[in-house]
Image (cartoon, grey):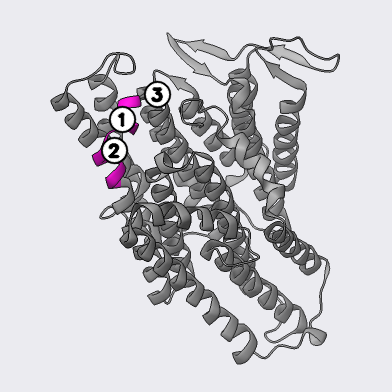
Amino acid sequence: MSAPVIWIVIPAILALLLLFIPTKKFQLALFFIICVILFLATIVVKIDSIGGVRFYEFDVPATLQILGRRFVLPEESKGLIRIVFAINAFFAGIVFFLDQKSRLIPLGLLFSCLLLAAYSVEPFLYSALIIEIAVLVSIPILYDQNADRNTGGLRYLTLQTLGMPFILLTGWFLAGGEITPVGQEQLIQAVVLLGLGFMSWLAIFPLHAWVPMLFEETRAIDSGYVFQMFFLFLFLIMLKFFNNFVWFREYAPVIQAFRVLGAFMCILGSAGSYFSQSPQKKNGYILLHIIGILTVSVGIMNESDISMFSQSALSLWAGFTLLTISSAYIQSDLNQTTSPGSQNQSAREFLGSLGLIIAQISIAGMPLSIGFSSTQNIYLTSAKISNVLIVLLIVSKLIISVVSFNNIAVLVIKNQWSLSDLNLGKKELAFLLVLIFFIIAGIFPGLSLPVADDLISGFQNLIQ
């Protein structure tokens, strides 16, 4: 028994077994219980403990070898493991709460295990193969046999598949490059291959058009879950490149490319969210904006520290999660049997719209939001580097703020709902508690900082 067996192999097998359970509610309950148990296992399981273990703890090795390849989950990776299974349990609760049929139960567990395997595999080049398998697993989560359109999904699958050979070529090209210096010509070739691979993976311009298309074609809860998890792991895998290859993170053109492309993606995503008429496509463009912010944070990391990335990632994904579940809540309202204009329907529309506003304000980094602190850190660091960079970032955030202000105008002025007339049932009260939690997290940002530190504790070469 080893850490990869506990948190990758066993849950992946259980996810496959859950497919054979015909009762959806029982399947959902087992999925939730499995995720909670795996989350709690991080408390009682110690990985390669040096100083001994307590009476309630178990010591397991960090490495699993399969066909000459190693999967390594050290003690420092437990923060990421907690986040993965917490997200799975949270979305299982949302599926139950909204009473939706979603294939992320149980395929989401298999999908997240594959991403965790891609993050932990050594040599790193094999992560490209596992990510491709994860992409294939994500397709049935996003689309079912009744899907009217799948253009975005086809482009997503195509571009992710095209990114794989570039990463494989880079890994073959730089075998031993961690300890052996490479020549200038070899370095340029490796950077080009790696750049093309990550541009395909991360939907960097001009390979981004599939994101809003796919969001428009799929349910909000499915696309939100898949791409929150998917892009989080892609950025972490990219940070492993920075952590392992000192010449890569110190190569000036790479850092400059991250800053330029990231700033452009910020503007592209925010402008797309402003001009788009479809609520689903707005979410896709906001995701592109988030990708841009995280790309910039990687590019300016040398001027600050890696904690800026982890705090930005945590706050942005928290905002995007609220954006996802609010959109799913509004979409579920469209399928309700209540008559239009009823008090119950008005409450759902009001709370769903309020959730969208809080999420967009958080992503915009406005005061008293969960994204305020991390956004200010990015502003301060960017201002030291380039005036153009800081202006582009501020403009992109202002555009997201305008989108939230437009929603406020629709919520308050156009509909003119009266809170006293809203009938809050159990589901409405539960969703209101989620909104209150996000508001409290924004007022007290220090509560989430330990989680952000756990996310990057394994990148020892990047921690300053």
Q: CA distance from mark 3 to mark 2?
A: 18 Å
Q: Position of residue 262 (x, y in %)?
A: 35, 53
For disc 2, the marked residue is 197
Point out the frontmost of discs 1 and 2.
1
- Three-letter amino acid code of the residue under disc 2: Gly
Q: Residue at x 65, y 21 (%)?
A: 6
Q: Is residue 362 left or right of residue 379?
A: right
Q: Position of residue 118 (x, y in %)?
A: 46, 28
Q: CA distance from mark 1 to mark 2?
A: 15 Å
In this view, 115 is above or below 55: below
Q: Residue at x 57, y 41 (%)?
A: 108
For disc 3, the marked residue is 244
- Is residue 199 part of the magenta span, yes or no? no
Q: Quadrant of the N terminus?
A: top right
- Is residue 250 part of the magenta span, yes or no? yes
In this view, 377 is above or below 353: above
In this view, 218 is above or below 45: below
In this view, 126 is above or below 82: above
Q: Is residue 50 left or right of residue 376?
A: right
Q: CA distance from mark 3 to mark 1?
A: 9 Å
Q: Is residue 37 left or right of residue 295?
A: right
Mark 3 vs 2, N-terminal side: 2
Residue extending furthest left? 185
Q: In terms of secondary structure, what is the magenta stretch mainly?
A: helix
Point out the frontmost of discs 3 and 2.
3
Disc 2 secondary structure class: helix
Does the residue at mark 1 contact the one at mark 2 (Cβ under 8 Å)?
no
Q: Position of residue 372 (x, y in %)?
A: 58, 60
- Give the extent of the magenta segment: 246-257
Disc 1 secondary structure class: helix
Question: 45 and 36: which one is in front?
Answer: 45
For disc 1, the marked residue is 248
